[in-house]
Image (tube, rainbow, N blue to C red):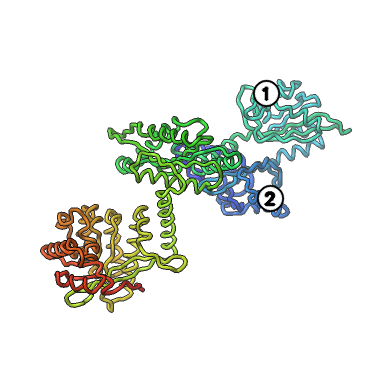
Amino acid sequence: MTAAPLSPSPFRPLTPQVEQLYSALWETTTDAVLILDVDCTVVSANPASREVLGYAPEALVGQNLAILQPPHYREAHRRAMRRYLESGIRTLDWRAIEMVAVHADGRDVPVDISFADFEIEGRRLFVGFFRDISPRKRAEDALSDERGRAQTTLRSIADGVVTTDAAGTITFLNAAAEQLSGWRHEDALGRSCSDVLQLVEEDSTTTLALVARAVEDHATLQLGDCTLLVRRDGEVFSIEGSVAPLTDRSERPSGAVIAFRDVSPSRRMAAEISYQARHDPLTGLVNRTEFNRRLRAALRSASQDGSCHSLLYLDMDQFKVVNDTCGHTAGDELLRQVATVLKATLRKRDVLARLGGDEFGVLLEDSAPEVSRATADALRRAASDLAFSWKDKRFPVAVSIGQVDFRDASMTPIEILSTADAACYVAKDRGRNRVHIYQPQDEAIVRRHGEMEWIGRINRALEEDRLLLHAQPIYSLQDGQILHHEVLLRLRDTDGSTVMPMAFIPAAERYGLMPTLDRWVIRTVLARIAREGEAGNRVYAINLSGASLADESLAADVREAFERSGVDPARICFELTETAAIGNLAHASALMVELKALGCAFALDDFGSGMSSFAYLKHLPVDFLKIDGGFVRDLLVDPIDQAMVEAINHIGHVMGLRTIAEFAEDERIVSRLREIGVDYAQGYALARPTLLE
């Protein structure tokens, strides 16, 4: 029978096996398990919360832990939690403590509480295990009054209870202790406690002599978090509990009582939660969070003893081809196979992590730069040797690698990762399937960092509404009338200065932000036209990037924007650069046909810059040809440029197109363009761009 999914639960296990394990542990443990955030608000509660604390799980979610605490305890808990969070300690090690919890019906419930903490996707969480120890507390109270009545009570409670004499010989086992130890009461009586209760620490075979210590020291001893009980048949349990000394009426040692319980389900749940918080569920490799932790540790060791370490940043080449061709199932299988071959190439002590998507990180501790380079090459070759096939299709596999060596803490973990990422992209730019080693003053990486910084600045400008639009009119060279206004994008920096497009557009093109910017311009211009209403008659020319031309959803988005704004499509002329149009010829043609059917016009910008301009022109249904400004600028001094302008103008007119000359920077150029017969011109000699309010 398949276990029901956790409800309510903040976790989303990514494999059926993990989900089934979580569900079984979550549903069957008799401890109330609460998952809390850092301010002690309950994020999730298991079904046992109803039995232990009286609350339905859904009633606890969103409540603060304070509702379960007596008033006199709340402030002390807040102070303890605040001290712990401010200490910077990342691993909580709170042993089980006893306290009184407030039941939903208002009564006090004695409970044992233990906590653990973990981090998932950057979120700090705590797990609290609440066990109702009312029966045990009643039993302990009864022991002080009457031994016979206590033994009767002990036989009925769920915790295992064992008593011994001063020599450590078993005098009593209750039913729970019989079940957990595998010894019947009559078989255990008279035997040494160490024979019946084989208590050991994890990763140790040494039996714990806790009874003798408790009797000798006359003190209660807690069973540690790593205490195991070896059952008579060899099965091993994780247990929690205590060993307390017993005294006679003269206060002399008379033996000990051991109270314990099986916490294996809770421990397994905590271990699985901790494991999932530190590992990638697809590949089984450590995840980015755990990798960052180990990188910080390596930086500390480098700072302390000067040891040399290296970080490798790996990015798969052409991974998207597999995903797009065969689907994400094939992509996941490729990632698993790549992880396997990479791990087999490394030393056991090296750390291999999946950082996200198709990116991997490798931490090489105590590795000289030349050794790290050899390791990077070995990883590259291992990936290239992987023959990946999916349903009779074979795909080449390759990785690009960025390497950063460090022997001190002059860079932070974030800076090292960012630099290695930049080095990896330099490797991609230089041909892929290669290693690029970061060196100080590496110009390629400096440029990459600058572009990456611009991505953040562009996104912040979008969020903070700091993008600006300017407009420059295009004039007829025959009658001086305005044809339309070209919309030009600017960015207002945080200091109020205006940033020109060539400062940030290359980064936006490189990292896929142009479709977002293009859509913002379209929405903003249409909103302005809608505000103008019938009184306005301007036609606006809007530039479209090559990335937008390749976006199959653009036409539908533009059509929806027209419908929502109510703007006549005839008031928009879209401009495509010749290079972008030729590079996306099929998409560009389809887009132009669809939008021209709505009433939009099209201009081919920078015409003449390509090698086959005229050959491609007949395949594009454009209305205007914008002559590349590079030819116009030197029109008066370079006869070749003049010939190009004349040729483009002539061909355009033969094809029934109107021509526009860019970069008309002075009156002499304007006069010459008029003599040649160019229809329209745009440039500082006619008008400068002005802010589009």
**Looking at the image, do the residues carrying marks 2 and 1 touch, with CB atoms under 8 Å apart?**
no
Residue 350 position (above or below residue 102) = above
Q: Nearer the viewer, residue 211 or 54?
A: 211
Q: Which residue is mark 1?
A: 183
Which residue is outermost to the front?
Answer: 637
The amino acid marked with disc number 1 is Trp
Q: Which mark is residue 350?
A: none
* Left or right, 561 with reference to 27: left
Label 1 environment density (alpha carbons within 10 Å; few <14, some 14–19, many ≥20): some
Residue 495: % across, % down = 47, 67
Label 2 environment density (alpha carbons within 10 Å; few <14, some 14–19, many ≥20): few
Residue 346: % across, % down = 46, 31
Q: Nearer the viewer, residue 173 or 491?
A: 491
Q: In which quadrant is the C terminus drawn?
A: bottom left
Q: Which corner quadrant of the image does residue 306 belong to?
A: top right
Residue 29 position (above or below residue 68) = above
What distance separates the C-alpha of mark 2 from that of mark 1?
42 Å
Does the image show residue 449?
Answer: yes
Q: Which corner quadrant of the image does residue 439 belong to?
A: top left
The amino acid marked with disc number 2 is Ala
Q: Nearer the viewer, mark 2 or mark 1?
A: 2
Does the image show residue 23?
Answer: no
Residue 312: % across, % down = 45, 40
Q: Which residue is mark 2?
A: 80
Residue 666: % across, % down = 25, 72
Q: Nearer the viewer, residue 571 or 364?
A: 364
- Marked residue nearer the N-terminal end (2 or 1): 2
